[in-house]
């Protein structure tokens, strides 16, 4: 029995060597071709991850939309709490939303580096916030070129619901 076990163990040890010798040419040729194919695939996969036609600006647009919605929601919350929207220009509205109001309530948080009266969009320009006819809030971003009033601006208009005070 020890001879059979020994023979089986010896066969197991020799099998990988036989396979290596038998397929050495295929493995060698396939190996170099495989590495080339893998390299090409990796390069193509990496290129597909590159943002062709995209820019950092494109990434900022969704952030801008979310921030503008947050500002509009803060104005709605202020309106519900005080029975009317904050008064004044954009800076006065932002200050009121950040706690400069009769009760000291904060509806909007400051971010690092922002002054109390400014709220910066992802391009570093202050949002323009206005209450229109006491019935809606308009929030505008100057967009990538940082100039209000041209084609790349972002803007939302939201209706305000008056709350009971």
Image: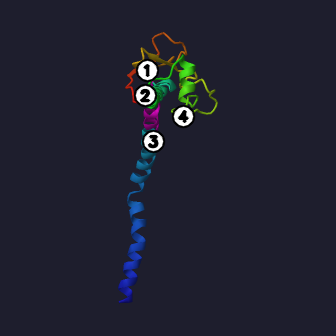
- Secondary structure under badge 2? helix
Q: Is residue 16 magenta?
A: no
- Residue 36 location, x and y as percent? 45, 41
In this orientation, does residue 12 appear?
Answer: yes
Splitting the image into 4 quarters, where does residue 110 fall? top right
Where does the magenta region start and end? 42-53
Measured in 3D between alpha carbons, the distance from the residue under mark 4 to the one under mark 1, in whole angstroms, is: 18 Å
- Secondary structure, mark 4, is loop
User: Which residue carries the number 3 mark?
Assistant: 36
| Image point (53%, 21%), residue name | 127
Does residue 18 lie above or below 144 as drawn?
Answer: below
Identify which residue, 133 or 74, lies in the foreground. 133
- The residue where tag 1 is placed is 137
On the picture, is 162 further left or further right than 109? left
Q: Which mark is residue 76?
A: 2
Could you tell me residue 65's position as x and y percent? 44, 26
Q: How dense is the environment of label 4, judged by Cα within 10 Å: few (below 14), some, or many (20 and up)?
A: some
Residue 133, placed above or below residue 5: above
Q: Residues under labels 3 and 1: Cα distance?
A: 59 Å
Label 4 or label 2, whichever comes before in sequence order: 2
* Residue at which label 4 appears: 106
Q: In the rendered view of the protein, which quadrant contains the N terminus?
A: bottom left
Q: Are marks 3 and 2 in contact (CB under 8 Å)?
A: no
Discs 3/1, front = 1
Give percent across and percent down for residue 115: 63, 26
| Label drawn at residue 12 | none
């Amino acid at each position: 029995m020890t001879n059979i076990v020994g023979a089986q163990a010896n066969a197991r040890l020799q099998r990988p060597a036989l396979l290596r010798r038998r397929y050495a040419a295929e493995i060698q040729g396939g190996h170099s071709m495989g590495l080339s194919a893998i390299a090409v695939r990796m390069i193509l996969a990496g290129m597909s991850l590159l943002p062709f036609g995209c820019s950092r600006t494109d990434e900022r647009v969704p952030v801008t939309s979310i921030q503008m919605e947050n500002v509009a929601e803060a104005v709605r919350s202020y309106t519900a709490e005080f029975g009317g929207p904050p008064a004044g220009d954009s800076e006065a509205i932002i200050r009121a939303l950040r706690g400069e109001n009769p009760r000291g309530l904060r509806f909007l948080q400051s971010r690092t580096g922002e002054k109390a009266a400014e709220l910066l969009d992802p391009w570093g320009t202050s949002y323009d916030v206005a209450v229109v006819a006491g019935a809606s809030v308009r929030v505008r971003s100057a967009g990538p070129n940082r100039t209000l009033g041209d084609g790349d601006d972002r803007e939302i208009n939201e209706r305000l619901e008056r709350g009971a005070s």
